[in-house]
Amino acid sequence: MKFGEEIIRGIKYQIEITSTGEFYVEVDGDRISGPTLEIVKRKLSDHVKAMAGSISIPFVYWRPAEWDDKWDDKKPCLVKAECVGIHAGNDNLLIKQEGGKVQQMSHYHRVRAFDPKHAAKLTELGTAKHNAIKAFDDFNKNELDLKAMVQEKLKKGETK
């Protein structure tokens, strides 16, 4: 009989209960069970943790210029990484950037991930976007201050 859903290490499981009060869940054809819900949750957590060591999903993303700040001198670029799991406590993705350590990728700040086979096109488009934004920002020096212009004309008494 269905008991309820539990999210363990970022994965949603349907917990069931037998007529004798034993809790269980079916995972990959195996039954994980225990006399209490807490025991089943702990076993599930251990199971997911053991499986997580074998996860590696390679991806690339574009690191935009907007991420630059006074603490970070990196320029817009293509970043190679791999997703290695989901954080048990906050559901963030766990990623490992090329040559780096495992970090969390917040679901509030997720990047658009692409298959590495699209790296060249993503670099081309990301660079073009960066250059276009930079050119547009540079062009803004030509912007008119209409309010100041109207006030100047009114001050001089100029009309049509």
Image (tube, rainbow, N blue to C red):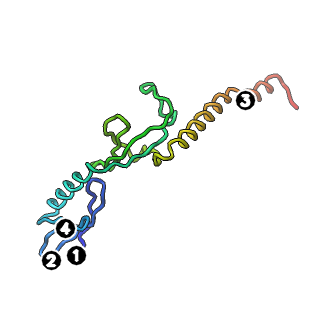
Marks 4/2: CA–CA distance: 16 Å
Marks 2/3: CA–CA distance: 77 Å
**Residue appearing at x 49%, y 34% in the figure:** 77
Q: Which residue is mark 1?
A: 1
- Mark 2 or mark 1: which comes first in sequence? 1
Between 117 and 112, the one lying in front of the other is 117
Which residue is situated farthest in the right direction here?
160
Side of 11 where 133 appears, left or right: right
Of circles 4 and 2, the one toward us is 4
What amino acid is at disc 2?
Answer: Ser
- Mark 3 or mark 4: which comes first in sequence? 4
Q: Which residue is mark 3?
A: 144
Q: Which residue is mark 2?
A: 19
Query: In what element is the residue under mark 4?
Result: strand
From what the image shows, is residue 138 above or below residue 29?
A: above
Q: Which residue is mark 4?
A: 31
What amino acid is at disc 3?
Answer: Leu
**Residue appearing at x 23%, y 51% in the figure:** 49
Give how far across and how far down residue 148 sits, in percent: 72, 27
Quadrant of residue 36 in the image?
bottom left
Give how far across and how far down residue 94 sits, in percent: 33, 45
- Mark 2 or mark 3: which comes first in sequence? 2
Quadrant of residue 71 in the image?
top left
Label 1: how many Cα within 10 Å (few below 14, some 14–19, many 20+)? few
Marks 1/3: CA–CA distance: 70 Å
Of circles 3 and 4, the one toward us is 4
Marks 2/1: CA–CA distance: 8 Å
